[in-house]
Image: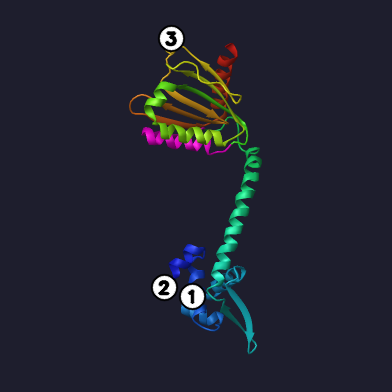
Amino acid sequence: MFEKELQDLGLNDKESAVYLALLSVDNDSVIDLAKKTNINRTTIYPILESLMAKGLVFESKIDKKIRFSAEGPERLATFVERQKVLFEEKSERVKDLIPKLKTVQRESGEKPIVKVYEGKQGALSAIEEIYNNNPIDGISYSIYSKDLLNEMFNEKEREKFFKLRKDIKKLKSKSIYVSSAGDAKADSMSQRVRLDEKKYPIHCDINVIGDEVRISNLKSNPTTVFIKNKDLAETLKSIINYLIDKK
């Protein structure tokens, strides 16, 4: 009873069993705890040390014997609060760690990571994945048909992934596109070149950020391929840069 609730708060199964056993008595010995919980005696010691580190158990000496007692249930709130603080600290640390780890990550000649997404929902998931990598700065490279994107995604869906890009404030964009509505509105963060859709038809949505490439066909039965490979990404960036420079 209550083991599952304690495990949901962050204790493992053995910690939950020992804590509950101690909570039902004033104090107990390691030998008695081993008998009550059916946990090996040698295993009980590290469990007690872990519970003491969490502030849920304390040690005392009674009649020259070492005994253990559980802190009151209200200390669980303190334990959860500490976990929350630690999680927030880890979240901040991982933001600093990711760029450092990227410096040792294999960058060239590695086996590409390839994922395939089916349907419109799969395409949306791939868009979220490439933007949720949260590049601090850099450039998003794209090749797309604005008309086909508008046909495939409704206004609410388009607003969702436009917001994903906008939230990455320092992410600029370079795009090659076709559109029956004419030239897209220019802004300081974007470079766009519109092609003649009759002469140069585009039926896919291609996006490159960092060393990741997302390719979605925009016709019937949409399928999206997500590829992580620096060589492929750099090649596509070069093609887009070339087309923009030629204009």
Residue ID for mark 3: 199
Left/right placement of residue 168 relative to residue 8 reads right
Label 2 close to label 1 by CB (< 8 Å): yes
Disc 2 crowd, CA 10 A, few/some/many (<14, 14-19, 20+): few
Residue 217 seen from this side: no
Disc 2 to disc 3, C-alpha distance:
71 Å
Amino acid carrying label 3: it is: Lys
Q: Nearer the viewer, residue 162 or 235?
A: 162
Which badge, 2 or 1, is on the more N-terminal residue? Answer: 2
In the rendered structure, which segment of residues is drawn in magenta? 112-134
Badge 3 marks a residue whose secondary structure is loop
Camera-nearest label, 1 or 3: 3
Query: Looking at the rendering, in which quadrant would you find the C terminus?
Result: top right
Residue 166 seen from this side: yes
Residue ID for mark 2: 1
Seen as rendered, the residue at the extreme top is 199
- Residue 3: image x %, image y %? 45, 69
- Residue 169: image x %, image y %? 60, 34
Amino acid carrying label 1: it is: Leu
**In the image, is residue 133 part of the stretch drawn in magenta?**
yes
Residue ID for mark 1: 20
